[in-house]
Amino acid sequence: MPKPDRENYSDDEIEALWVEQAPQLNSTVTLADYDPSWPVLYEREAARIREILGDRVLQLEHVGSTSVPGLCAKPIVDIMLIVPDSSDESTYLPDLEDAGYKLVIREPDWEAHRAFKGPDTNINLHVYSPSSTQIERYRLFRERMRAHDDERDLYAATKRELAQRTWKYIQHYADAKTAVIDEIIARARAEQVAPYDEFSEAYADHAADNPYQALYDRPAILKLAGPVAGKRVLDVGCAAGHLTAKLAERGADVIGIDLSQGMVDLARKRHGDQARFERADLAEPLTFLEDGSIDLVTASLVLHYLLDWGPTLGEFRRVLRQGGALVLSVHHPEDWHWFDRPDYFRTERVTDEFPIGGKPQEVQFYRRPLNKTFGALRQAGFTIDEIAEPMPLPEARHLAPAVYENLSTKPRFLYFRAVK
């Protein structure tokens, strides 16, 4: 995929990243109509790679244009492979080479990226580490085009126009697509946050007294956080700052961050005298925080908005001091029953409705099985110190009897305290 964080590749850079001589195209680009055999070819390659590498395969996914039904593409199947450390070639390269895969690209200074060609199928096997920002980027782009025909058609038209030009290297063609790819990804991220910007005032009022948050989630987070006086705390997904203020009242020095600018503005207005609030995107590095500068990260009902947790958890671990803790809550994996989903083990995007401001508001997030949550924390280098399935506060029995009955008998949220 074209790189969002650098200038286009020069000829010298292209020649340097290829292990052997960089192949020159000096021609137009041939695009093929969508072929239903592409997913079949991916599944065959995925099975072979898993057999070769075993548990060294942390994630393996079909990405790129051939993963989007109805999209034209170069007839080359792109595969994303996540290994524990892509810069340590000794842990995977010899076994892949023995099976006929050939290393063709090595980029040690950019995402520790490696690329292989297959032994008998035309593929690009892209290898990254769990902390790579490309994981979320690949997924957002793929899922956006799968769900929006207009985005898929826009990208297809752009590709067809560019494919008619003559390119010295195929990378130049890839670089020329960066602008439209960035636009599509930006719209995907904006869609995730837009609902909260639109009803930020109503949501802030709702969250203040909603029993699921006031009598269940926030107390559970605070209990797992323990004493916070004198600690520096990062409150992730702070919304209007209700939890942030509670942490500050207990003596913590708190920074609250949220993707929604509307929420950040409200938090500053309501609690700006107690804590600092900043807009931040969890899909991007938290560049305003130094390594080891945080004692505690709280993430209340926020991580399930992310498809991939790897880069975000990596940033949490980076900013935490040694021995610092991450306290988080997410939807309980039992939620597959709530949404009437057919497959518990699938990680998938679902839609829910919140009664906010007197009317239902749709929000979307990702549900996943328990092993995916455990695996993400482990792969990011955390030790899980405690898991909780809490009860609501006793006063909920009188203040919200129906909610109390529901939360006392059925799992709703799941809580973790994880330590660096």
Image: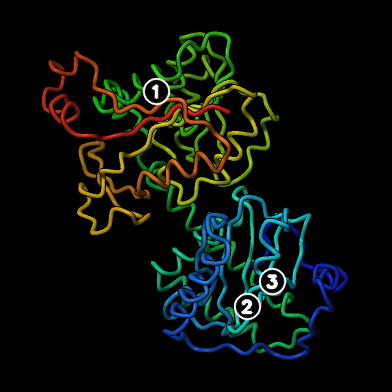
Q: Quadrant of residue 416?
A: top left
Mark 3 neighbour class, 10 Å CA radius: few under 14, some 14 to 19, many 20 or more:
some
In the image, is 289 to the left or to the right of 230? Answer: right
Marks counted in the figure total: 3
Q: Residue 118 shows which numbered tag? A: 2
Q: In this orientation, which residue lies closer to the viewer: 11 or 381? A: 381
Is the C-beta separation of discs 1 and 3 under 8 Å?
no
Mark 1 and mark 2: Cα distance apart in space: 47 Å
Q: Residue at x 41, y 20 (%)?
A: 224
Residue on which disc 1 sits: 221
Q: Mark 2 against mark 3, which lies toward the viewer?
A: 3
* Disc 3 target residue: 97
Label 1: how many Cα within 10 Å (few below 14, some 14–19, many 20+) = many
Above/below status of 319 relative to 7: above
Q: Quadrant of residue 296?
A: top right
Amino acid bearing label 3? Glu
